[in-house]
Structures are given as structure tokens and as C-alpha cells.
Image (spheres, coloured by chain):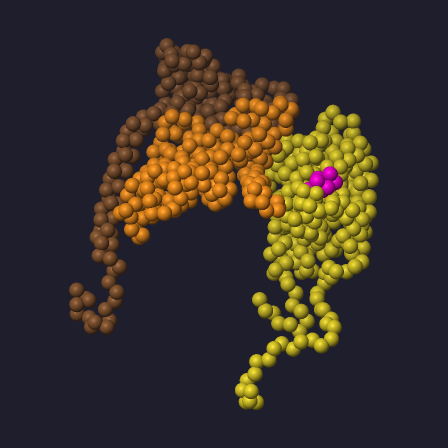
């Protein structure tokens, strides 16, 4: 390896210190769009995990032959292929979920998280590190999505994973499952993450 | 240095005390403390509160009690979290609570009032950095949140309670009745306030008394309600002129929350523009939006959305209308 | 070759490394190779999963048909469902309805019609079940809607849409606020009159457009 973090470092960096959503603020479109229930968030995270691991692995294997002016084409080609595979697989095996996620699975092609990992890690480091990085980043993405979806689904429909957890008397906060709820929840949760990080760093909590 | 070379001189330093010349508003005016302004607003709200109590009785009491209590508690908690002494004494949280309560229907469930108050103070104000920093009118942020969340209880149909002991609460609001079945309310009812609606909006008379007091005391910038009502009148004239349907310009002005919004909501000094020209643009924008929403959208009333929308434009309006100092050049 | 003819002083720096250029031409081949490999992969995926996806799409509509024509789900295997496309011209505009004709033991069991119309927020797509003689409605299902959550989206919920069951197709249905009493009346959802009326309007259009056509079709079979 020519420098750079090791495989295990890459893995753990992706989960919180370099969380793609809360720290890098990448992939906002799908983050805001698919988090009104936990099942959709989990499916989305799984699709991203599959695409990112495959893309990172392939790019890492061919990294010695990449030249600056053609690398983006190769990244996009690879990502688009695996996104299509993921999209077709969802449509074949979990059709209702595929319909619910609508365009957001195909839109993984333009999700910055994936091309960013190809560029930052896979194009420079070996396949094991690249796969560890992909797994860490996808887990971080999944964690962020599920945390958002947990708040939104609970307040917005009184449910988790589609089954009722709050009493029937709970008035659903409809705004939480609508786009404004996504922005509000995201802002508040990011504030919370920053506050914890600041406290852990020993700084004065803001 | 020789005389023929151009010398670059430092800017002349003033030798004596400087008189600062700035266009109004003079924010440092010691006569206008936040507390004094808020007390003025509360005084101005007295006629509106009285009409709400008279027409909606204990529903109004309940709504105002919940909103006041939650707003004050939220202000205390959030200020403490930010490491500040609770600035309850400035009265701004109380004003937000009363205005929010008066903008809710009598039928609104208790949790709507409580959540609305929490959101108004928390998301509407504290997150931006407290009083003076908020971009949007806190009471309207809270109301928009609960209105979208509990559309069934707070939407047009939520105002009606067929089982209510209070007669006016069994009827649809004048704007809804007109929009859905073309029923035109009597102007006298709209003026007195004996119609259904949000607690504080029904009586045009009470809003006018309180509003004129605010404007005469210079607590509210008179340009905002004036331009808002003017813009609404112009569009109402166009609307009724093009297709006369019994709902006159006066109905448009006295019905719904137009007057309450013009005097008590749009005039919030924090979320409205500072310059005179800006205040005219702001007011006219709200008036126009209210009428467009009333006439063309599915919603019977649009004051809340109009105020929030123009709040978003306030920083831009402030920049557009920076006054040119006397003798200064336009340098933008 | 240009470097040879130019004076030495004007010679520009050659490309950084020779193997960089070779790498570049190889990269062209790499892109083509990857495109072929990935293309093959996608073709394989499509060949494997394509039929399953097509079946899912078909089933989405077909699986609703038994309940819409009041056939118990257990008997759904006995149904013979035949899709038809029926063009209807009204006021110079031609709409082609997708109609499913369900037969059970060679006898007509009912009709299911797919139709769309404008709702409050966006288009509403419904499936409407009609009795074999096209005299009454046997079921309504909302396939697609984006009405206001909490208000208008109740059109997709069973309590509201089951009101349509048993309604006659002979006269246009009317949406009433609070307390529908007559056979041709439907209760509006409180606070969502527009969504309610939209669905009723689609139903009315379908019955007006297709009633006679389908009745003729059914009569033809019987004779």
C-alpha cells in the first residue's frame, strides 16, 4: 500500500468520523427522499452497500491502469452497471419496495458518495482496503438513513418497520413524513451529532 | 519627499466627537426597548383577546393558557440549554404564545397548541439564535407545522364542531363557506366577529382597534399593514370587478385573518424589513400573496403562508432598499 | 515528427512519460473491454430477472381483480382473465381504456377497468370492478395517488372506497358532505372534498363511457 489509512481504519472512519451524511454531507437527495420509513431506508442503504462494494472492488483492481482523463468515465461506467443490477434485482424480488423507492435507486448512479469513494480510496489503495472502505461508508450511510427514518416514521406515522409502536391515540405528525420533516429532522440530528462530537473532543459543547 | 510627487495621504482622522448620521430606524433608541414594545403589543391585543373570549368562551381560555404556558416553558428551557438566563422578562415569548393561540381554531386539540408552541419557540426562534435572529415569524412557523401535521383538525374542515354548545362553532368559516358553497357572510357579522374562524381573526373591529393603537404608538411600522391592505384591496377590486359574485372587497378585507395578520403578524419587527421602502414592498407582497392564495388555491385563507413566504424575502428586500445617505452616491 | 523540424529552443516539453501515452491508448481498450463485460453482465441480469419483473408488474393489477369482482381469493386460480383495450371517442377525443374481462367456468364473472383522472394534487389511477351485466359497481381500488397525507389520501383506504361497492352504474354518482342517503350518493372525506369528487368523477366517466359497450359485449357472449 502506498500510504493512506489501513483497511480497518478506513472501515471505522466511514461509520462516524467521516460519516458520508452527517460529516461529508454527501448523497443528500436520497437521504432526504427515502427516509420517511425505516424499511425504505434499509433497502436504500443495502443497495448502496452492494453498488459501493462492487464499484470499489473493480476500480481498485484496475487502479494501475487508470489515467486522469479517462478515470471518471470508467467510474461512471462501473457504478451505472451495478446500479442497474441493483435496480433490476429489487424490481424482481421486492417489487412493492422497488415501486416505493421509485427513481431513487437509479439515482444512486449520481450519488456523490460512491464516486467520491472510488476517487478517494479505490483508485489509490488495494482491493481489501477498498472493500473495507466501501463497507464502512455504506454502514455510515445506512446508520444515518435509519436514524433519520426512525425519528420520521415514529413521529409521522407512529410506527417502526411498518408496525404500530405508539398507541392508537398518537396523532401522526404528518409533516414529518413530508419533505419539510426530512429537512427539519436532518438539521436537528446533525446538530446533535455535532454537539456530541464537540463534547467528545473536549471542547465546550455548543 | 518633494512637492511635485503625488502623496498618498491617510484618511483624515476626525479631531473631535463624531455625529453619526444614519437613516431610521434608530435601533439604539432608548425609548424603544424590547420589553416596552412587547408590552405595547400585549396591550394592543387586549381587544382581540376580549372578542375571542366573548365569542369562543372557555375554548379561547384553554388555547391561550396552553400556548402561553408551553411557549414560556420552552423559552426558559431552550435559553438555559444555550447557557443564557431565560429572557422571559422581555415578553417576546408571551407575545408569540398569545398570537399563536389567537391564530388557532377554537376546536384545535390540545396537542396541536402544545406542539405548535414548542416548534414556534424551538425551531422558529431558538435554533436561529434567539430573539432578533429568527428569519421567520415564530408563531407562524409553529402554526404551519401543526397545520400541515394535523391537516384534519386544523384545515378548513377542522374549524367546524357540529356538537359544540357555541353556536358559531357549528358553522363553517365564512371563507370556507364561500369557497365551497358560495355562501356570502353578512358584513356586520364579519365586522363584529360573530362568525367561526381562528380565535383572534373573527372580529375586524377588535383587530382595527388594537392595530391602530400599535401604529399610533409607532410600535408597529404602519407602512406594512397599509401596503398589505392596499395590495389586497387592488387585487380584490380586480377579482370582484372581473366576476362579481357577492363577495365584495370589504368581505375580503374583513373576512379571514387579513386584518389580524396585517397588524399583529406581519409587523413583527424581527422578521420584517427595516427600511421604509422595504416595508412597503414586504406588506404589498403579503397582501398580494394572501389574495392569490384565496382566489386561486385550494386553501380558503393564505395569511400564514404569505407571511412566511415574504419573511423569506426580508433579507433580500433589506439589501435592495439600503437607503442612500444624504450626499452619498449610489455605490452598489 | 514536429519536434524534429522545430528549432531546439522552441521544443516544448514532451509528454511526461512515454508509458503514460501507452497507458492512455491501453485505457481506451480498457473502457471498451469494461463496456463489453458490463454489457454482458447486464444482459445476463435482464435475461434472468426480466420475466420475474414483468410478472410482478402484471400481478400488481391482476392480483387485485378477484377482490374487485367479489371472487374469494381462494377461487382466483379458476378465473380466466383476458385483457382488452377499448377505445372510446367522446367530444372528438379518443381514450383507450384497459379493461380486464374475467370469466369463471366459461361464464362472465365481471369486468375490471383501469382509469385515470386529475385529483387534487396529481393524477389518480384507479381500478374499477363492475358486475358481469355492468349494472353495478363491485369494487374500487386506488393504484396511484399523491393526495394530501392525512386528508385526501384516505381515498385509498378501505372504509371510504368500499362505499362504492354495490352502487348502480345507471346514474352518475354524487359526492355529498356528511350523510349520504340515496343509492347514488357517496360521502365526501371531511376536509378532502376535492379528492373525493375526483374519484367519483373518474368512476362516473368510466361508467358513462363503457356501460353500453361492455353490456353489448356481455350480451354478444350470452346469445
First to last magenta residue range? B71-78
Q: Which chain is yellow?
A: B
Residue A47 percent across, percent down from the top left: 40, 34
Q: For residue B72: magenta? A: yes
User: In the visual, does B261 lie left or right of C169?
Assistant: right
Colour that chain A carries in the picture: orange
- Majority secondary structure of magenta residues: helix
- What residue lies at 71% left-to-right and 53% top-to-bottom? B269
The correct choice, above or below, for C157 with respect to A33 in the image is above
The correct choice, above or below, for C77 with respect to A103 in the image is above
**Residue closest to the eye, A98 or B252:** A98
Residue B212 percent across, percent down from the top left: 79, 51
**In terms of image quadrants, where is residue C38?**
top left
- Judge whether residue C96 can be spotted in this image: yes
- Judge whether residue B67 can be spotted in this image: no
- What residue lies at 80% left-to-right and 31% top-to-bottom? B58
User: In the visual, does B295 lie left or right of C60?
Assistant: right
- What residue lies at 69% left-to-right and 60% top-to-bottom? B276
Q: For residue A149: magenta? A: no
User: In the visual, does B188 lie left or right of C35?
Assistant: right
**Residue closest to the eye, B28 or B245:** B28
- What residue lies at 69% left-to-right and 75% top-to-bottom? B14
Residue C99 percent across, percent down from the top left: 40, 24
Colour that chain C carries in the picture: brown
**Residue closest to the eye, A105 or C62:** A105
- Tell me the quadrant of the picture where the N terminus of chain A can be found: top left
**In terms of image quadrants, where is residue B154?**
top right
User: In the visual, does B42 lie left or right of C109?
Assistant: right
Amino acid at each position: 500500500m502506498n500510504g493512506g489509512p489501513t483497511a480497518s481504519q478506513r472501515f471505522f472512519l466511514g461509520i462516524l468520523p467521516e460519516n458520508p451524511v452527517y460529516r461529508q454531507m454527501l448523497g443528500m437527495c436520497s437521504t432526504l427522499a427515502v427516509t420517511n420509513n425505516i424499511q425504505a431506508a434499509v433497502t436504500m442503504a443495502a443497495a448502496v452497500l452492494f453498488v459501493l462494494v462492487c464499484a470499489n472492488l473493480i476500480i481498485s483492481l484496475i487502479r494501475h491502469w487508470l489515467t486522469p482523463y479517462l478515470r471518471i468515465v470508467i467510474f461512471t461506467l462501473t457504478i451505472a452497471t451495478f446500479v442497474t443490477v441493483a435496480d433490476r434485482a429489487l424490481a424482481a424480488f421486492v417489487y412493492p419496495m422497488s415501486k416505493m423507492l421509485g427513481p431513487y435507486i437509479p439515482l444512486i448512479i449520481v450519488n456523490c458518495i460512491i464516486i467520491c469513494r472510488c476517487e478517494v480510496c479505490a483508485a489509490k489503495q488495494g482491493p481489501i482496503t477498498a472493500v473495507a472502505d466501501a463497507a464502512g461508508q455504506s454502514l455510515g450511510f445506512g446508520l444515518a438513513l435509519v436514524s433519520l427514518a426512525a425519528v420520521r416514521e415514529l413521529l409521522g406515522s407512529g410506527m417502526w418497520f411498518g408496525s404500530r409502536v405508539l398507541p392508537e391515540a398518537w396523532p401522526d405528525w404528518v409533516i414529518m413524513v413530508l419533505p419539510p420533516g426530512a429537512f427539519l429532522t436532518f438539521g436537528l440530528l446533525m446538530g446533535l451529532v455535532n454537539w456530541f462530537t464537540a463534547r467528545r473532543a473536549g471542547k465546550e459543547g455548543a | 519627499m518633494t512637492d511635485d510627487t503625488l502623496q498618498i495621504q491617510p484618511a483624515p482622522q476626525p479631531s473631535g466627537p463624531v455625529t453619526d448620521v444614519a437613516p431610521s430606524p434608530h435601533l439604539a433608541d432608548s425609548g424603544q426597548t424590547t420589553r416596552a414594545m412587547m408590552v405595547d403589543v400585549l396591550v394592543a391585543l387586549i381587544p382581540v383577546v376580549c372578542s375571542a373570549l366573548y365569542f369562543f368562551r372557555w375554548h379561547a381560555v384553554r388555547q391561550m393558557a396552553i400556548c402561553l404556558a408551553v411557549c414560556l416553558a420552552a423559552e426558559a428551557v431552550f435559553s438555559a440549554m444555550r447557557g443564557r438566563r431565560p429572557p422571559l422578562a422581555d415578553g417576546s415569548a408571551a407575545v408569540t404564545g398569545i398570537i399563536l393561540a389567537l391564530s388557532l381554531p377554537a376546536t384545535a386539540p390540545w396537542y396541536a397548541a402544545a406542539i405548535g408552541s414548542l416548534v414556534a419557540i424551538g425551531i422558529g426562534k431558538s435554533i436561529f439564535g434567539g430573539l432578533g435572529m429568527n428569519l421567520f415569524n415564530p408563531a407562524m412557523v409553529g402554526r404551519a407545522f401543526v397545520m400541515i401535521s394535523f391537516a384534519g383538525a386544523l384545515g378548513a374542515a377542522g374549524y367546524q364542531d357540529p356538537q359544540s354548545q357555541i353556536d358559531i362553532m357549528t358553522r363553517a368559516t365564512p371563507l370556507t363557506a364561500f369557497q365551497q358553497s358560495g355562501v356570502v357572510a353578512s358584513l356586520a357579522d364579519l365586522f363584529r366577529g360573530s362568525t367561526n374562524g381562528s380565535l383572534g381573526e373573527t372580529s375586524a373591529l377588535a383587530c382595527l382597534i388594537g392595530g391602530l393603537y400599535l401604529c399610533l404608538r409607532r410600535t408597529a411600522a404602519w407602512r406594512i399593514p397599509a401596503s398589505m391592505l392596499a395590495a389586497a384591496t387592488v387585487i380584490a377590486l380586480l377579482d370582484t370587478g372581473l366576476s362579481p359574485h357577492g363577495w365584495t372587497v370589504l368581505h375580503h378585507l374583513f373576512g379571514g385573518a387579513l386584518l389580524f395578520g396585517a397588524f399583529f403578524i406581519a409587523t413583527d419587527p424581527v422578521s420584517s424589513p427595516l427600511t421604509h421602502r422595504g416595508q412597503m414592498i414586504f406588506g404589498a407582497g403579503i397582501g398580494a400573496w394572501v389574495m392569490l392564495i384565496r382566489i386561486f388555491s385550494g386553501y380558503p385563507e393564505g395569511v400564514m403562508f404569505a407571511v412566511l413566504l415574504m419573511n423569506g424575502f426580508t433579507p433580500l428586500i433589506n439589501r435592495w432598499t439600503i437607503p442612500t445617505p444624504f450626499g452619498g452616491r449610489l455605490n452598489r | 515528427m514536429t519536434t524534429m523540424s522545430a528549432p531546439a529552443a522552441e521544443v516544448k516539453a514532451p509528454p511526461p512519460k512515454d508509458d503514460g501515452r501507452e497507458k492512455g491508448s491501453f485505457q481506451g481498450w480498457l473502457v471498451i473491454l469494461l463496456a463489453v463485460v458490463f454489457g454482458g453482465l447486464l444482459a445476463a441480469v435482464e435475461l434472468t430477472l426480466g420475466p420475474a419483473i414483468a410478472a410482478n408488474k402484471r400481478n400488481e393489477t391482476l392480483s387485485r381483480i378477484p377482490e374487485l369482482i367479489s371472487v374469494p381469493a381462494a377461487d382466483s386460480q379458476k378465473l380466466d382473465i383476458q385483457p382488452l383495450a377499448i377505445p372510446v371517442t367522446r367530444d372528438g377525443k379518443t381514450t383507450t381504456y384497459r379493461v380486464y374481462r374475467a370469466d369463471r367456468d366459461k361464464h362472465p364473472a365481471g369486468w375490471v377497468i383501469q382509469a385515470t383522472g386529475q385529483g387534487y394534487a396529481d393524477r389518480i389511477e384507479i381500478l374499477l370492478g363492475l358486475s358481469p351485466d355492468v349494472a353495478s359497481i363491485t369494487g374500487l381500488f386506488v393504484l396511484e395517488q399523491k393526495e394530501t397525507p392525512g386528508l385526501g389520501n384516505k381515498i385509498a383506504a378501505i372504509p371510504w372506497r368500499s362505499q362504492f361497492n354495490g352502487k348502480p352504474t345507471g346514474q352518475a354518482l354524487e359526492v355529498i358532505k356528511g350523510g349520504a342517503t340515496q343509492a347514488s350518493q357517496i360521502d365526501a372525506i371531511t376536509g378532502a372534498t376535492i379528492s373525493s369528487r375526483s374519484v367519483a368523477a373518474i368512476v362516473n366517466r368510466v361508467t358513462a363511457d363503457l356501460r353500453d359497450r361492455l353490456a353489448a359485449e356481455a350480451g354478444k357472449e350470452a346469445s
